[in-house]
Amino acid sequence: METWRWHELVVRFSTELSGHLETILVDRPGRRPVFFGEPSGVNDLHHAEPAVMGGPLVAGAPGGAPEEQTMSNSIPIPLTVEAEALSFGERSSSLLSLFDSLPPGESFVFTSRDSPEWLLATLRSERRGQFDWTPLDAGHRQFRVEIARRGADRGSLRRVSDALSSDHDRLARLEVSAFVARAAGDAETARNWYEAFSFGLRRHIAMEEQLLFPLFEKRAGLLPGAGPTEVMRGEHREIERLLVEILRTIGDPAKLPDQARAEFHDILEEHHQKEEGMLYPALDEVLTSDEGDTLVSKIQEFPG
Ligand SMILES: [Fe+2]
Ligand SMILES: [Fe+2]
């Protein structure tokens, strides 16, 4: 069983990102990456218009320079597709074509003024087991969802440990992106990445407490308010407290969130080790394959 290795991810993504951010910030001063929390229309680097309105749908930077396409492979800046740019009658086939063009591990962001439930239903029906679906905001003004392609056979059933460990990895990339930007002197970018991380981690925590823990307690015969899940809830509160503290300071070049970050990593690493090493595998063990797959569907639907 693979366990959580935050430090390895930090080193890997810091190394990859630092070079690319330097390219963005130094060589292309007028351009900046899009952030998962930003409103639409700011993604000048990877806007989807040329792909969805005309030629073949491809992931990366349609119409962009090779340099931009290289950046999209290493930094988590997925292509953004706006629902309003797609013709209504062809939107499902266009998005399935885009999805099929992605290599495993790559993703795109879909934005829409209306609920994208229809797209989730389409993917479940046509690409079952092959995608991850992650809401990126609460859908108050606009719905934003990241759709990632998995390296799995069509129709395969999902397991809790796989789905949630993937979300841990996704969140780690966002957190590292924030601190790489801060180290490069771009406090605004750092704050935007960290807001995206904060939203994602809060959603992840809420989903665990509302869906996973109660089910685990029920199956394990634990009383609510006692046992390992109660310890995990307590760690969540501490994680959230540090999240607020870091978010308050990361965008201020005069402040140093390093101590809070170190404390945050200590707690989160151990927390994720327990989840990936014990809690998630235990759920996989006590649930049938169909029950696990249904639970992953609920996780995907879970709002921000
Ligand atoms: Fe957790
Ligand atoms: Fe978790």
Image (cartoon, rainbow, N blue to C red):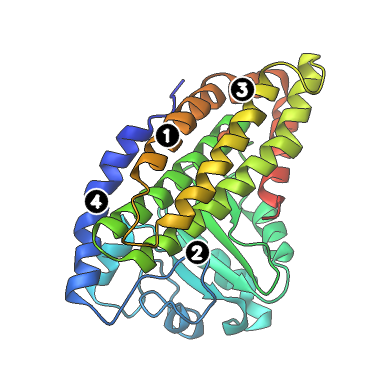
| Spatial CA span between label 2 and label 3 | 29 Å
Q: Residues within 10 Å of mark 4 (few under 14, many from 20)?
A: some
**Image point (53%, 50%), residue name:** 244
Q: Which residue is mark 2?
A: 36
Is label 1 within 8 A of ligand 1 (CB to nearest ligand atom)? Answer: no
The local secondary structure at tag 4 comes to helix
Q: Which residue is mark 3?
A: 279
The local secondary structure at tag 2 comes to loop
Is label 4 within 8 A of ligand 2 (CB to nearest ligand atom)? Answer: no
Residue 95 position within the rendered picture, expressed as x and y whole percent measured from the top left: 56, 68
| Spatial CA span between label 1 and label 4 | 24 Å
Ligand 2 quadrant in view: top right
| Spatial CA span between label 1 and label 2 | 26 Å
**Image point (56%, 72%), residue name:** 94
Q: Which residue is mark 4?
A: 16
Q: Nearer the viewer, residue 173 or 287?
A: 173
Nearer to us of marks 1 and 4 is 1
Q: Amino acid at mark 2?
A: Phe
Dot label at residue 171: none
